[in-house]
Structure formats: C-alpha cells, structure tokens
Amino acid sequence: MDEPGDTDPMNLRKPVAAPRTLPEVQGGSGDHFAAPLGSLRSGRLRFANGVHRVVIRADLHLRGLYRACFGDRIPTVVVQKGTVTIRYPRVLTCDWLNCRSERLGEVALNARIPWDVEVRGGASGLVVDLRGLRLGSLSLAGGASRVEVVLPAPSGTVSVFILGGASNVTIRRPEGGAARLRVSGGATNLKFDDRRIGAAGGELDLRDRVYDSAADRYDVAVTGGANNVSIDKQQGARGRGSGESV
C-alpha cells in the first residue's frame, strides 16, 4: 500500500499540515491538532513510522474529523481527503523503549463515520479503544508490544492484522462477536476465549463455533509469532461508544 501524497488536493505541490489548535480552545495542555469533518463519509488513521504511548479512542460527540494531543515527542500531522497521517521525528528504537515516563498522547476519532486504523513501524504502549466505532480494518505492522485493543461490534468480516510478531497483546471483542485467530511463527502463552496454549510451533488456526456461519465477525491474523497474547470476549460490552478510554 502506497503512502499518501501529503499534499493539498487543490495544489499538488504544497503539503498541508493539520492545524494546531490552541490549548485554551480544546482544553488541557500541550500541542493539539484537529480537522473539520466537512462532507467526509469515512476516515483513515495512519501512523507512518511507529507509535509509542498513545491512546486511540472513539468519540461519538466529536464534531470534527479527529482531535489529537501528544506527549513530549510532537509528530507531524497531515490530513488529506479523510486520511490522518501521523509521523514522528526519527528516533532510535532504544529511545522509544526508555521513555516510559513520557506523557501519554491521545487521538480521538469521530465515531459517526467508519474508520480504518493502520500503524507502520511498530507499536508499543498502545491502547486502542474503538467501542462505538464502525471499524473497517486494524493493522499493526512492524511488531506490537504491550498493546491493548478493545474492539467494537463488527460489521461484515473485519480484518485485524498484527505483522512482525506480538508480545503482551490483549484483544477484547464484544460479547457474542464471532472471531477467528490465525498465528504463524509459533506461539507461547496464547489464550483464545477459554482455550489456552502453552506452546505451539508452526501455524495455528482457531475459531469459535459460530464463526463460519456468522455474517459479522473478526478475522485476526498474527505473523512472526505470538507471546502472551489473549483474545477474549468483553462482558457487557456496549454497542455504541461513550467516548471513554480504557
């Protein structure tokens, strides 16, 4: 998949960065970013080169397309035709891992339109609470470590990809939501609903009893191995979002 051309559709030579909004307008402190919803009917959130210590959540009451604030590392944010691309300054991998004291960033997505969420370059310390959102797909490429995902009710077959290995990853889906889990590269300490696998090599293909006949379901694929990964049903999960984060 090609990177978006970060340009103004009215002027192909001029890149357009998302405007920063003043803290006193949005509340809180630090740098804030936002964009109007306009006539957009769908959105895509894309982290172009990794993400660390960020909460992504759905907000049913948000008027704009999205709203974001970040910790000590301020990224470049570009919006083009509903695609919000977030790119951090280049840093060493060890710098990401040693910044546990960094303030959490937050990205709120307008829950009145469907979204695809994509992370390239790895994810660590990430919380994705998409309750109430119409999710088209979720992709974490480059590995995932210390990641928690709360999924909304699916519409059709929704793909969730974790590419490059998963460690200490928890995925929760609504009660009654059908799911399939495919793992390549081996697994240790894997939990899929009531099934637990201490260690397994090769490929795994697990699915609940109603998956094959379900019209609305999740297809979760993990490549590069899985360690301490769980996929569970969340008791009492709500179908519509409240804008709360995990």
Image (cartoon, rainbow, N blue to C red):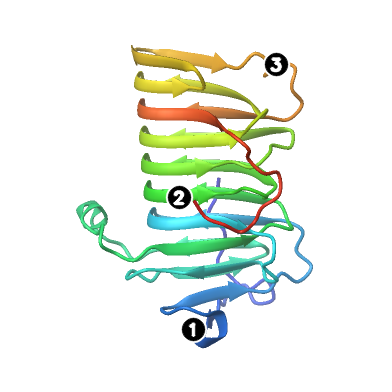
- The residue that appears at 59% across and 41% down in the rendered structure is 151
Residue 193 percent coordinates (x, y): 52, 22
In the displayed structure, 97 sits above or below 163; it is: below
Q: Is residue 203 visible?
A: yes
Q: Which residue is mark 3?
A: 212
Q: Earlier in the sequence, mark 1 or mark 3?
A: 1
Give, as a three-letter code, the residue at label 3. Answer: Asp
- The residue that appears at 52% across and 29% down in the rendered structure is 232
Residue at the front extreme of this rendering: 236
- The residue that appears at 77% across and 26% down in the rendered structure is 215
Which label was assigned to residue 127?
2
Q: Which residue is mark 1?
A: 23
Residue 82 percent coordinates (x, y): 66, 62
Mark 1 crowd level (few <14, some 14–19, many ≥20, 10 Å Cα): some
Give, as a three-letter code, the residue at label 2. Answer: Val
- The residue that appears at 20% across and 55% down in the rendered structure is 98
